[in-house]
Amino acid sequence: MITQALVSQAVLIAEKRRNNPAASVYSGRARMMLERGVYAAKSSNWLVIVSGFFEPVFYLLAFGFGIGQLIGNLTDGNGNPVTYAAFIAPALLATSAMNGAIYDSTWNVFFKLHFGKIYQVMLSSSLGPLDVALGEITWALLRGLVYSLGFMAIVVPLGLITDAWGLLAIPAATLIAFGFASFGMAITSYFHSFQQMNWLNFFLLPMFLFSGTFFPVSVFPQWIQVIVQALPLWQGVELVRSLTLGIIHWGLLGHVAYFVVMIVGGMWFTTVRLRALFMR
Amino acid sequence: MSQSANDVVIQAKGLTKKYKDFVAVDGIDFEVKRGESFGLLGPNGAGKSTTMKMISSVSQRTSGELKILGKEPNTHGPEIRAHLGVVPQKDLLDRELKVWENIFTYGRYFGLSRKFLKGKVDELLEFAQLTEKRNAKADDLSGGMQRRLAIARGLVNEPEILLLDEPTTGLDPQARHVLWDRLFRLKEQGVTLVITTHYMDEAEQLCDRLIVMDNGKIMAEGSPAELIKQYSSKEVVEVRFGTDKNEKTAEKLAGLADRIEVLPDRILLYTAKGEELLAQILESGLHPVTSLVRRSSLEDVFLRLTGRTLVD
């Protein structure tokens, strides 16, 4: 028998959640999206995923060790000398986390929204839009985390993490990836053409180059500094660099708060947009 | 839950859906009983798919009442969706996944256990005649197979009601018959089927009862046989005299049949006795290019109700 006369498992599972708050948008099964991601990844092209990891590594080699030879040492916030490679390594770690999260939460989400159309099918099951948002964002953040762990595996043996606080760079990278994944998916849900998607790159490249990644923002006039400091990558770079150089102060919590707002806001907008797109 | 044959599983009263100024569904009333096969028939844009979306609790109605298995979709959406199997118009398979993974992951979305799904997936692949294709990518299947996979996926949560939006649109005749056969089997097992279609033959084959929709409203309701009896004659004579002569010749034929419809390419004469009428036409000295006597169909019902043919 394909169906049973009795109430099915699926109904019993759904009925149990009846009185939960937000039951209409959240079923508590975002992890099923991750499971789907694992099945999809098994038969996808791993070279594409691996190539994304190398980008910041190449920057580290070219700038840290190449141009770094010409620059010599800098001084950190506490006035201690620091090699140029150790100065940019944390910034590239933050960038790794961002890149991984952005690949999946923008282009891949765009494709699923407009060509794969898989969210529509998910939302015809008893999943809610918050499950889909949380699942996809978590999947994207995992890619960011994998990239940043890979990057750590290269910079730690090279002695570019000079302080024990540097271990906290891993949770910090997770937070950064989470923020970008959440914000990335939210913004992608508003895009409906490739041209709009290309604006993302137009925005991401200058943010990567000028967020205190390769030189301190103090070289800019005051008004430009204010703009840069409002950008998420600068917040991430500052957070990770302070940790790897062991410059610990309460101000770091401000960066953390910035990403928490990004995560919560992004997730809220994504949920609202999924409802508007597929449940209207 | 009682299982009596007269159980109403879907109940709509004054059901309305507006998108800004556009009224997609305009205050319709209908009931679907447990175990029956219910059709929504109408041309593209009639409001069938919008009605389906409201039933599947992914789209909220603008006004009116809607109860699915006694539950309110606005507040019990996820629960209702757990009762339903949905086969969307364009299959919408997960093209990154293999055939079996499509069914498996969809089952996981409902929270079903891996152990339960292992057996379930095999059973559904067998049912959909896709066992040999289980490890193929969904993308590599033929149109008919993709549709069967979409149905198998829709059955993974053991739904009481299966919603099929245009189930055979775009399939070749052979694939259509395979699909109809599968749907008959489900019906025999007591699954309630709700089917939208703009194919008359499909509605006649599959539906116990149907509503004819046009411009968001219900034009008629009943079994295919009842509708034909009520809105058409037993038989139809189709004659063609050539595009420019049809209109003129129709005037001469007036009075021979109960009712005449003149279409751009042919004249339809409605009567109880088709062969006799055709003989009469030939005797009167008219010579149609082609002629055909056939039984009345839902196509004729639709033409009568709306003045238009259904598939353009």
Image (cartoon, coloured by chain):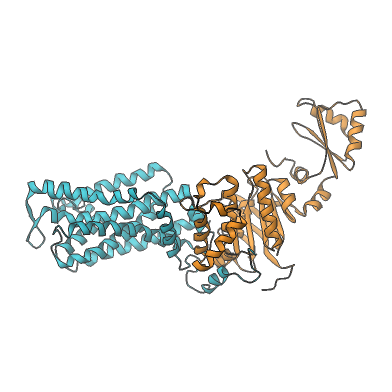
Chain colours: A cyan, B orange
- In which quadrant will I find the C terminus of chain B? top right
Residue B241 lies left or right of residue B197; in this view the side is right
Residue drawn at x 69%, y 52% as measured from the top left: B181
Name the one closer to the observer, A158 or A267: A158
The N terminus of chain B, quarter of image:
bottom right
Residue A62 in the image, given as x and y percentages of width and height: 16, 46
Q: Is residue B149 above or below residue B251?
A: below
Q: Is residue B276 left or right of residue A19?
A: right
- Foreground residue, B299 or A202? B299
Q: Is residue A64 left or right of residue B222?
A: left
Tell me residue B46's x, y (percent). Answer: 65, 48
Residue B97, how many percent across, how many down?
Answer: 47, 53
Q: Is residue B89 visible?
A: no
Please state which of residues B267 and A155 is positioned toward the viewer in this rendering: A155
Number of residue marks: 0
Residue B111: percent from left, percent from top = 50, 67
Residue at 15%, 61% in the rendered image: A161
Please give left or right for residue A168 compared with residue A125 in the image: left
**Outermost front residue:** B132
Q: Quadrant of residue A251?
A: bottom left
Residue B201 shows in the view: yes
Residue drawn at x 47%, y 72% is A21
Q: Residue at x 36, y 63 (%)?
A: A264
